[in-house]
Amino acid sequence: MSHHQRKVGRPSDNIDAREKLIHHARELFVVMAYDKVSTRMIATKAGVNVAMIRYYFGSKEGLFETMLRETLSPIQKQLQALIADNSEKNFLDIMRTYYQEMIKVPQFPRLVAQVMHMPPSETQRKLLEKVFSDISKPMQGMMFNKLVESGILRKDADPKLCRVSYLSLMVFPFIAPPALLAVHGIELTEEFLNQLLEHNIKLMKHGFLDTQGGSHENQ
């Protein structure tokens, strides 16, 4: 899970430098305002020359966008798997993949929430919307409709409301105020998120998934 574990065995110092820049940019952007994070600060944290940011990403904006894309890449791949095969397993694996990736960077969903509350003219908002559009545009509005057609969602389920419920189950534990979680004795550990995932799957199976369809398997 740590950056040091990920970089073991890398054959190229240049590739390693790029990964370090993305890693440390993410660490800074999730805890500091965008305007307060300088390219020099990121480079210093990463232990590389600041010129490498221009070389790999063109600018701070390019690095921010790349950081977003690479953080969300595993979820994008799972979305594409669902497009290719409308199965219950692929549908549930989106949430599974999301939890697996976000436990590595638990503050990232809160960053996304904060950015989306910014005025549309803000650089971060523009970049985030661009990334979201590229990742989810093929799925917008049609994913849950197709799931109904495939017999994965109940025929009497409202696809739009199902989408809201699904997203809520995915993002809430990460964007909830830490103080609120603490009041309820909740700590976002890998063990807890694994338990929450299985719990959410049961909720969906007893709520809007058509478990009687017989044409799809859970796992």
Image (spheres, rainbow, N blue to C red):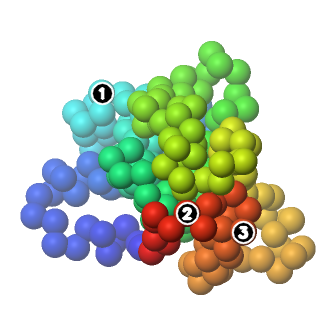
Quadrant (top left, top right, bottom left, bottom right) of the C terminus? bottom left
**Which residue appears farthest toward the right when viewing the image?**
183
Q: Position of residue 139 (x, y in %)?
A: 48, 36
**Amino acid bearing label 2:** Gly
Residue 110 falls left or right of residue 73: right
The residue drawn where x is 87% and y is 76% is 184
Between circles 1 and 3, the one closer to the viewer is: 3
Pointer 2 local density, CA inside 10 Å: few below 14, some 14–19, many at least 20: few
The residue drawn where x is 65% and y is 19% is 120
> Which is nearer the N-term, disc 1 or disc 3?
1
Q: Position of residue 15 (x, y in %)?
A: 18, 53
Q: Is residue 193 above or below residue 155?
A: below
Q: Give the label on residue 213, or none.
A: 2
Q: Give the label on residue 49, or none.
A: none
Task: Choose between 213 and 22: the one closer to the eye.
Answer: 213
Q: Position of residue 83 (x, y in %)?
A: 38, 44
Task: Choose between 186 and 165: the one closer to the eye.
Answer: 165
Query: Element type at marker 1?
Result: loop
Residue, disc 3: 206
The residue drawn where x is 26% and y is 67% is 7
**Amino acid bearing label 1:** Gly
